Image: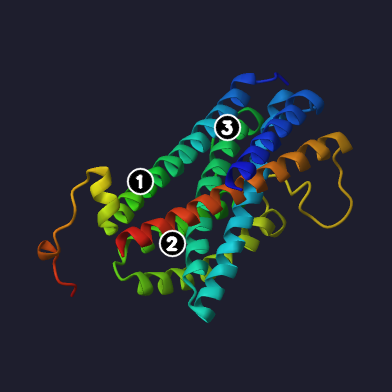
Amino acid sequence: MPDNWGFVLAAYGLAAIVLIAYWRFLFRREKELEDAAAIRRDLRQPSRAAELGQPQPNPASRRPSP
Amino acid sequence: MRRLLGGVTLVGLLAGFVMGFGIAPRETTQGNVQRIMYLHVPSVWVAYLAFGVVLVASIAYLVRRAESADRLAHASAEVGVLFTGLTIATGSIWGKPTWGTWWTWDARLTSVSILFIMYLGYLLLRGMIDDRERGARFAAVLGIVAAFNIPLVHFSVYWWRTLHQPPSLMKPGPGTMPGIIVAALLVNFAAFTLLYVYFVTRRARLLRLETEAEA
């Protein structure tokens, strides 16, 4: 039987693409959420936020929780 | 810890690749196309493992209502769907040169497709229900019901006449494969199991971060 290396390459190539794409999705999303969490933490600490020059939340603009 | 697990997983996958392509011999009947087995069989093992974990975590969630159990079930189902998809795709690629067809409505192929669709439905169900607690409860019930399909997939090759060969490893009794091929397969089993643990821990952490961001 012929070796059919093309099929072997297709199977391993497809698996590599799918697994790397999933890993990249996890990595990027995690980084996004960690960055957002760090900003939220900074905003909760007014002195730290002022130190970083970030805008501080205006308590009056907050919507009441339902 | 995550980096260490990621590093060990990468080393395991490289070792599996070397075993599959460098150490394991060319199979006499099928030729080198048989090397797809080192990817296809560990993928279906991870799918079984992932959906087994969904079953256990779903029961744990319904009993204890622990959010961590729900996150584990969700993460494991997602990774399981990913590996079931890979199993179907690599099996189809392997089937063309060996069976002469990309696809046939064989009992094994059909049952694994149903498994894939059921857990895809599980993920869609989670996304459709806005109330987190209600969604988790419904998903847990589906996660338990869908698990009944796992033995159906595995034993389909015994229960029906199929084109798909019976299992060579995950079966009772002595194996028929040469030791070096079994060794290459076991290294890949270990590597894929590590990859499963790595993906699930990262995905579960991501789900926790998403919940915190929404709070």
- Distance of mark 1 from mark 3, alpha carbons? 41 Å
The residue that label 2 is drawn on is B122
Which mark is first along the chain, 3 or 2? 3
Question: At numbered mark 2, what does the secondary structure look like: helix, strand or loop?
Answer: helix
Mark sitting on residue B41: none
Which residue corresponds to mark 1?
Answer: A35
What residue lies at 61% left-to-right and 48% top-to-bottom?
A: B1
Badge nearest the viewer, 1 or 3: 1
Residues indicated by labels 1 and 3 sit on the same polypeptide chain? no
Asked whether residue B180 is in view, the answer is: yes
Along the viewing direction, whichever of B141 and A43 lies nearer the viewer: A43
Q: Amino acid at mark 3?
A: Ile
The chain carrying label 1 is A
**Which class describes the residues within 10 Å of circle 2: few (<14), some (14-19), or many (20+)?**
many
Position in image of residue B146 (x %, y %): 52, 65
Location of the C terminus of chain B by quadrant is bottom left
Residue at screen point 35% across, 50% down = A38
Q: Which amino acid is tagged 1? A: Asp
Q: As displayed, is residue B65 above or below residue B129?
A: below
Name the residue: 61% across, 62% down: B52
Which residue, given by chain and number where applicable, does mark 3 sit on? B93
The kind of residue tagged 2 is Tyr
